[in-house]
Image (cartoon, rainbow, N blue to C red):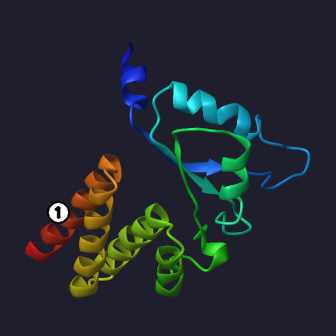
Amino acid sequence: MTLYDDMMQGAIDVHCHIDFEFSAQERKREPEFLWLPKAEAMGMRGVVLKSHWWPTVNVTPYILALVETKVALWSSVALNITAGGPNPCIIDACAALGMRPAAARCHLSLGTLYGRAGEEAPAREHLGTAAKMFGEMRMRYWGQRTEAETRELSRQRGA
């Protein structure tokens, strides 16, 4: 097994586009029923589906009806600046729809933004929520990013 094979074991792809995004001529390379078995064969744990245009919660059941897989599929809502950026109302909607990876990423983004703005209390609240959620989902990479932001917040306070 190579280092790359080892890295794929239990990995979660947090940025998987599910449809053509910017051009009808630039289609994605493969439909889900072709790439999901490949992800499973590589040992991936999950995929967060993304679209710049709409929440992906409505397509997940259709994809799962096309292919039997052990790879978990999560929906998301893009929080690009053009779509309004991180928004607490969107985070609540994501959580209510079961879109926990997206909601956790939103908490990380809000915690980071509050921290950079010097607002420590809401920064710690959002970073704490993100850390808890990433831990529950065993999303180590994002948990480490959250820990790094929390350390940066403490460093800023001490400076």
Task: Kindly identify the residue that appears in the image at 22 percent across and 59 percent down.
Answer: 147
Q: Is 108 or 59 nearer to us in this picture?
A: 59
Question: Relative to 126, does residue 20 appear above or below in the rendering?
Answer: above
Secondary structure of the residue carrying numbered label 1 = helix
Disc 1 crowd rating (10 Å Cα; few below 14, some 14-19, many 20+) is: few
The spot of residue 62 in percent (x, y) is 73, 54
Rendering quarter of residue 123: bottom left
Q: Is 21 or 33 nearer to us in this picture?
A: 33
Task: Kindly identify the residue that appears in the image at 90 percent across and 51 percent down.
Answer: 24
Task: Kindly identify the residue that appears in the image at 78 percent across and 55 percent down.
Answer: 21
- From the image, tell me which residue sits under label 1: 151
The spot of residue 144 in percent (x, y) is 26, 52
Give the residue furthest to the top: 1
Task: Please indicate whether residue 35 sits to the left or right of residue 139 in the image.
Answer: right
The spot of residue 77 in percent (x, y) is 60, 68
Task: Kindly identify the residue that appears in the image at 86 percent across and 52 percent down.
Answer: 23
Give the residue furthest to the left: 158
Give the residue furthest to the right: 25
Rendering quarter of residue 118: bottom left
The N terminus lies in quadrant:
top left
The C terminus lies in quadrant:
bottom left
Question: Relative to 8, does residue 17 appear above or below in the rendering?
Answer: below
Q: Is 127 or 68 nearer to us in this picture?
A: 68
Task: Please indicate whether residue 33 sits to the left or right of residue 95 in the image.
Answer: right
| Amino acid type at image mark 1 | Arg
Task: Please indicate whether residue 22 sits to the left or right of residue 119 in the image.
Answer: right
Q: Is 153 or 76 nearer to us in this picture?
A: 76
Question: Relative to 24, does residue 43 appear above or below in the rendering?
Answer: above
